Amino acid sequence: MADRQKTKVIDLNQRQKTIVLLNGQSQYHVLRHFIQDLAAAFQQLGYHAEIVDLLRPSWPADLEKTVKERDVRFFLSMNAMGIDIKIGETALYDYLNIPLFAFLVDHPMYHLNRLNRGVKNLIVSCVDRTHVDFLKRFLNGEYTKVFIPHGAPFRPHPDSGRSVGKRNIDIFFAGTVFNPDSYREKWSAGGRSIARLYDEIMERYLSGHDRTLIMAAEDVFEERGIDTEYLNHYRFWENLVYVDLYVRNKRRLDVIQRISKLGLRIEIFGNGWEPYLDRHPSVKFNPSLPFERVQEKMADAKVVLNILPNFHEGGHERIFSAMLNGAVCLSSGNRYLRREFREGEDILFYAFGQDLEEVLGEYFNDEEKMQRIAGNGRKKAMERHTWLQRAEKILETVEYHMFFVR
């Protein structure tokens, strides 16, 4: 039976409202696909969705035409792209009194330059609840802040219904890796004391469990008697981004090296892996894939491996997409994911540093268990974690913003 989704009934007086989605640059076109999926979701919910492509030379004229001819409810972009568009010296969104919804797909510290533009008619969503805490503590802009995780396409690949036993890839992973030491060189260039400071933050975070990277930094500052006022300086965050990237890549290497020892057919799509795994015959390396091809490979995988970025209470598109495409998702866990999903029932969790034979051993020998987990995960992702559900939450948040703030 085809998957069905309930949709919200929208008031008739809002059916002709337009949502303008600003589309920009992203690696492998991932964010551009997010915009397209959200546009389709808004249309399903009764709105007109207009995509303005900021990569086209004609985008200023396209945007002007849309604003003049349409009743624009709000603007939306990924990672606050287009936040710097102005009418004279005033932000477009403040000038028109129409909010910009900035959907961040990673930590706000990667987008400080954009978020510090002084736009007031702004809504910022974060994919992790701890990121919202960051905005409230360190970026006290008078704008709306909300937690909304990534979503997944609500129309999975046509082959997504294929049973686990008929899939050709044992474990699928998509992602590039960079040498972690290349990021350590960035903060080490600040001098001996700075190198030791950020080294200690990195080591503290890697050895911790539930504490965020910012918590680890605060602990180190306080224990060393360093003025915590520095935590409000741009250069602190600029270098903390390098620590974040160091940890992400260090963990990717560790997990892939562990899983490559299981003797299963593993396919990695991404760059940079060969120097680290060239002695593992069970691992097949492939070039990076565009987003739509990743969905296709997920539909042919028994297990899709997800290695979370440093998210402590949030979700990631790859988890939800894996489930929607009928695969078992094997992911590092966090508080949010453990509330949303049941270990061994609709997802498999592992911990960084854990022997993955402990997690996967019993399942690859039991196709019935694998199929049950895949089916349960697919059902839950379809009901709770597509861009359609995220679009509903966005509309709700805009309504709150326009009532309380505008």
Image: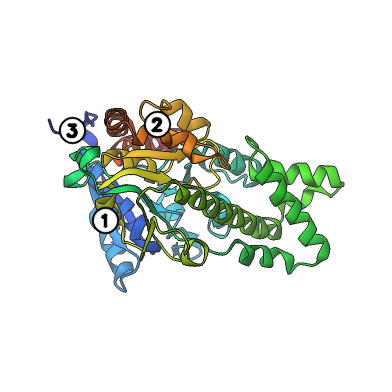
Three-letter code for the amino acid on which mark 1 is drawn: Glu
Mark sitting earlier along the chain (2/1): 1
Q: Earlier in the sequence, mark 2 or mark 3?
A: 3
Specify the quadrant of the image occupied by residue 241. bottom right
Residue 271: image tag: none
Residue placed farthest to the bottom in the image?
57
- Please tell me whether mark 3 sits on a helix, a strand or a loop: loop
Image marks 2 and 1: residues in contact by CB distance under 8 Å? no
Closer to the camera in the image, 261 or 166: 261
Amino acid type of the residue tagged 2 in the rendering: Glu
Query: Where is residue 228 shown, x and y percent of the image?
Result: 79, 47
Q: Is residue 24 visible?
A: no
Residue 274 in the image, given as x and y percentages of width and height: 46, 66
Say the numbered circle drawn on residue 3.
3
Q: Classify 10 Å Cα crowding around label 2: few (below 14), some (14-19), many (20 and above).
A: few
Disc 2 target residue:
362
Please state the horizontal and vertical placement of residue 257, each as a whole percent of the image.
Answer: 51, 53
Badge 1 marks a residue whose secondary structure is helix
Alpha carbon separation for disc pair 2 and 1: 31 Å
Upstream in the sequence, badge 3 or badge 1?
3
Asked if disc 2 and disc 3 are in contact, CB closer than 8 Å, the reply is no
- The residue carrying mark 1 is 292
Q: Residue furthest right?
A: 225
> Could you classify mark 1 by the number of other residues whose Cα lies within 10 Å: few (under 14), some (14-19), or many (20 or more)?
few
